[in-house]
Image: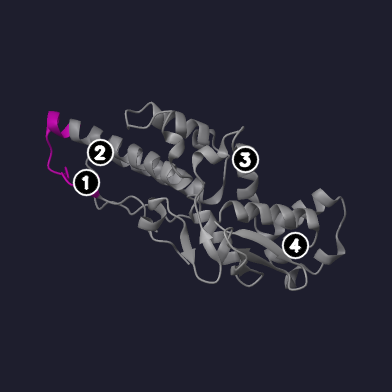
């Protein structure tokens, strides 16, 4: 299931039938004293984004064993791999619960996570080997991972605008594949840059943004900066390729 841009941007939890409510965490939930810290956050993303082979390596590393249960891995999927041992299964449970409104309870007999509303004992949905890949894709979407490439403008207002747009695409592509390898894309750097850019965000209010909202505002800010450079160049030197409505073009295509 692919979420709409409007739903992701809203900051609200998104109801998914048979599963529960998927949510993008707020930045204040990643603070080191009141939240899980960025190290824990990136660990959660890794667990959800690694492919099966990477997960098998992870499982064998943390267990210190070859794990015979993983030898016939052609019949296993990522959910099977992560739920072989209690410790990784609990980590997966913790990671998924962080991106949901519901509490997750493991049913060992059925090998399924039951999503229960925190205000009642009723089951809302479940996560098992059949829907796990869809669930983790949705959880990555709300964290601005696995988001599609930006919609390419039909023309750019200037060479600088084109160069910055292409740089934004590189960042989006890197963000879709990895979690935290480029220091420029570290959460701390993005928070700091956006807080100092005259955007209305500062270190007192920016932590009220969700992760998705933060990345969205960061990329939108960069794109509008590029458009601004083109507008200033046009006002000074003129030209016939300038698009006065270029700033309205959507840069994210989900």
The total number of labels drawn is: 4
Among the two numbered marks 1 and 2 on one chain, the one whose residue lies closer to the N terminus: 2
Q: Is residue 110 above or below residue 163?
A: below
Q: Residue at x 44, y 39 (%)?
A: 208
Quadrant in the picture for residue 37? top right
Residue 243, image quadrant = top left
Q: Please, which residue is most extreme toward the front here?
A: 120
Callout in the foreground (3, 2): 3
Q: Is residue 59 magenta?
A: no
- Cβ atoms at labels 1 and 2 below 8 Å apart: yes
Which dot marks residue 83?
A: 4
Q: Which residue is mark 3?
A: 36
In this orientation, does residue 149 appear? no
Earlier-in-chain disc, 4 versus 1: 4
Residue to which mark 2 is pinned: 227
The residue identified by callout 1 is 246
Disc ID at residue 152: none
Instruction: Estimate the spatial distance between the alpha carbons at disc 1 and disc 2, rounded to whole Å.
Output: 7 Å
**Image location of residue 213, percent across then percent down:** 41, 45
Coloring applied to the structure: one colour
Position of 18 with respect to 209 (left or right) is right
Mark 4 vs mark 2: which is more N-terminal? 4
Q: Which residues are magenta?
A: 233-248
Residue 206 x %, y %: 42, 34
Mark 2 surroundings within 10 Å by alpha-carbon count, few (fewer than 14), some (14 through 19), many (20 or more): many
* Residue pictured at 83% horizontal, 66% vertical: 69
Helix, strand or loop at label 1? It is helix
Given residues 186 and 10, the one toward you in this image is 10
On the rendered image, what quadrant is the C terminus found in?
bottom left
Counting residues from the start of the chain, the first of labels 1 and 3 encountered is 3
Q: Nearer the viewer, residue 141 or 28?
A: 28
Which of pointers 1 and 3 indicates the residue nearer the eye?
3
């Amino acid at each position: 299931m692919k979420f709409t841009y409007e739903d992701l941007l809203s900051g609200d939890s998104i109801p998914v039938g048979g599963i529960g409510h998927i949510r993008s965490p707020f930045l204040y939930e990643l603070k080191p004293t009141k939240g899980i810290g960025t190290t824990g956050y990136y660990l959660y993303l890794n667990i959800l984004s690694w492919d099966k082979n990477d997960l098998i390596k992870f499982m064998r590393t943390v267990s210190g064993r070859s794990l015979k249960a993983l030898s016939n891995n052609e019949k296993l999927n990522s959910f099977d791999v992560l739920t072989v041992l209690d410790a990784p299964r609990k980590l997966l449970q913790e990671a998924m619960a962080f991106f949901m409104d519901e509490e997750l309870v493991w049913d060992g007999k059925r090998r399924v996570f039951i999503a229960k509303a925190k205000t009642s004992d009723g089951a809302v949905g479940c996560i098992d080997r059949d829907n796990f890949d869809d669930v983790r894709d949705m959880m990555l979407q709300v964290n601005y991972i696995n988001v599609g490439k930006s919609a390419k403008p039909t023309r750019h207002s200037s060479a600088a605008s084109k160069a910055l747009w292409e740089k934004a695409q590189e960042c989006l592509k890197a963000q879709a594949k990895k979690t935290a390898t480029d220091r420029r894309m570290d959460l701390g750097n993005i928070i700091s840059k956006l807080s100092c850019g005259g955007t209305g965000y500062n270190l007192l209010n920016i932590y009220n943004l969700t992760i998705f909202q933060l990345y969205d505002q960061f990329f939108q800010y960069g794109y509008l900066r590029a458009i601004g450079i083109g507008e200033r160049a046009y006002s000074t030197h003129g030209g016939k390729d300038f698009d006065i409505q270029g700033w309205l073009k959507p840069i994210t295509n989900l």
